[in-house]
Amino acid sequence: MGYGFAAILRRDLLLAFRNRGEIANPIIFFFIVVTLIPLGLTPEPSRLAEIAPGILWVMALLASLLSVEGLFHSDYRDGTLEQLVISPQPLYLMVLAKILAHWLITGLPLTLLAPVLGMMLSLPAAGYLPLVLGLLMGTAVLSLLGAIGAGLTVALRKGGLLLSLIVMPLYMPVLIFGASAVQRSVDGFSVQGPLAVMGALLAFSLLIAPFATAGALRVSMHG
Amino acid sequence: MWQWFHRLGSPRWFYQTSGKWLPWLGGITFLLLIIGLVWGLGFAPRDAKQGNSFRIIYIHVPASFLALAGYYVMAIAGAVGLIWKMKLADMVMKSAAPLGAALTFVALVTGAIWGKPTWGTYWVWDARITSMLVLLFLYLGVMALQHSYTSVDAANRASAVLSLVGMVNIPIIYKSVDWWYTLHQPATIKFTEAPTMHPDMFHPLLVMIAGFYCFYALVLILNTRSEILHRERRSSWVKDVVLQNQR
């Protein structure tokens, strides 16, 4: 049963490493947009520090949203997705493998780079640990929820904008708890609450999202 | 025992039966809304703090009730359509989406209009307003997905999956927005609604809520009927119906 999972995970990671440019795109996007913030608002460190938690989380959310669009696209175009849907392996696990690969390629690098961007936005020192912990779990939730939208829109020719329309409302809880964990830590409060809720969101979406994505893919393939 | 359930799956049966309900339902809706509006707008006592501006509650509260209830109607219809492949449920789901979105919009707009005299501003990032806005986005997402598929069957199933995902998420989104709001509570603005309403104000509100429920059912049935005619346009019974109406 785990065979399909392992094979898909290995294949997707291999494909990603053969096209390293695509891995870099969301990260470069993250950097560029964060550069826009001081240009548009203010370069003053004290004011940047005030908005840094929210900005960093919104940017991570957008970067994840942009990358999740391609999650099933090439597989759909070359027919691999059809083979996955009709194969005897459980689709739940194969979808989970694709999502895990996507998170390892986009979510994890974003998480690891976030402290650098936090430094550029003069985030206070107390904010770094909750930022990284929150993003570690939060980007996984974003990948899981985004996969549902990607599955629903993969067969459509102009799915990109529609995907963001569908998925954004589902992303809101992640943004709220992620940004508030950082903010609370900067303000000197305990961050256990929001991080625990983030963990709960991760556990719950881990359970439900691959299932919904598998259903969405079946709809897209038969439609 | 399950015969009624199977019969409900037939659009034709539903079209013919609901045709008989329509005059009754329409009459009750009209009566309730007229009574509620005249009673609420004309005879209910003025509010001590807000004066006459509170009377928008008679539109605002029922619309907000049905905006949320409508999402569940849509999602449950979608689930029935997914599980039992019932054509009628798919049509109900498609008809419920724009109706719910419209009611959510009405709730937001009346809230904004009410906010100006009460809070001094049209828009506040209050927990309830924000969750209503998210609900509007959820509705718009389902509608957009429904319209972007060319195949009717795929459109139905895709939007059913999405509305079910939304239904699971609504409590989470509401709770998190609540939590977010208590964290950032603005000090200057407070909701000045009295904790308990005077019965003289409350009874017309109940009538209006009942009227809005009937109105929702009425419009949903009408929308579904036109959807049935559209989708079954090639079948012989629809041709008969159209010919009968022309005569």
Image (cartoon, coloured by chain):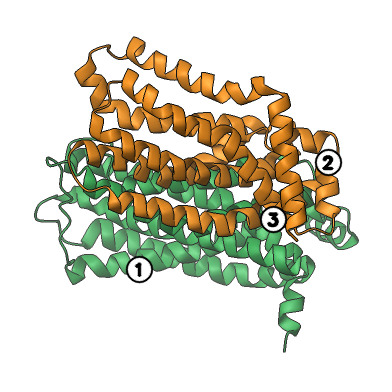
Chain colours: A orange, B green
Marks 1 and 2: which is nearer the front? 2
Q: Which residue is at 71% across, 78% downward?
A: B5
Q: Distance between the residues labelled 3 and 2?
A: 16 Å
Q: Going by the image, does A54 lie left or right of B151?
A: left
Report the residue marked by disc 2.
A80
Q: In the image, is residue B151 above or below residue A47?
A: below
Is label 1 in contact with label 2 (beta carbons under 8 Å)?
Answer: no
Q: Along the line of sight, which residue is nearer the eye, A6 or B90?
A: A6
Label 1 Cα crowd, 10 Å radius (few <14 / some 14-19 / many 20+): many
Q: In the image, is residue B149 above or below residue B23?
A: above
Pinpoint residue B79: horizontal percent, then vertical percent. Answer: 64, 64
* Callout 1: chain: B
Per the image, label 1 sits on a secondary structure element best described as helix
* Callout 2: chain: A
Report the residue marked by disc 3.
A93
Marks 3 and 1: which is nearer the front? 3
Label 3 Cα crowd, 10 Å radius (few <14 / some 14-19 / many 20+): many
Is label 3 in contact with label 1 (beta carbons under 8 Å)?
Answer: no
Q: Are marks 1 and 2 on the same chain?
A: no
Pinpoint residue B65: horizontal percent, then vertical percent. Answer: 40, 60
- Number of residue marks: 3
- Say whether residue A215 is visible: no
Q: Quadrant of the N terminus of chain A?
A: bottom right
Q: In the image, is residue B147 above or below residue A214?
A: above
Per the image, label 2 sits on a secondary structure element best described as helix
* Callout 3: chain: A
Q: Which residue is at 80% across, 44% downward?
A: A81
Pinpoint residue B245: horizontal percent, then vertical percent. Answer: 78, 57
- Say whether residue A32 is visible: yes
Query: Which amino acid is tagged 1?
Result: Val
Query: Which amino acid is tagged 2?
Result: Thr
In the picture, the disc for residue B207 is 1
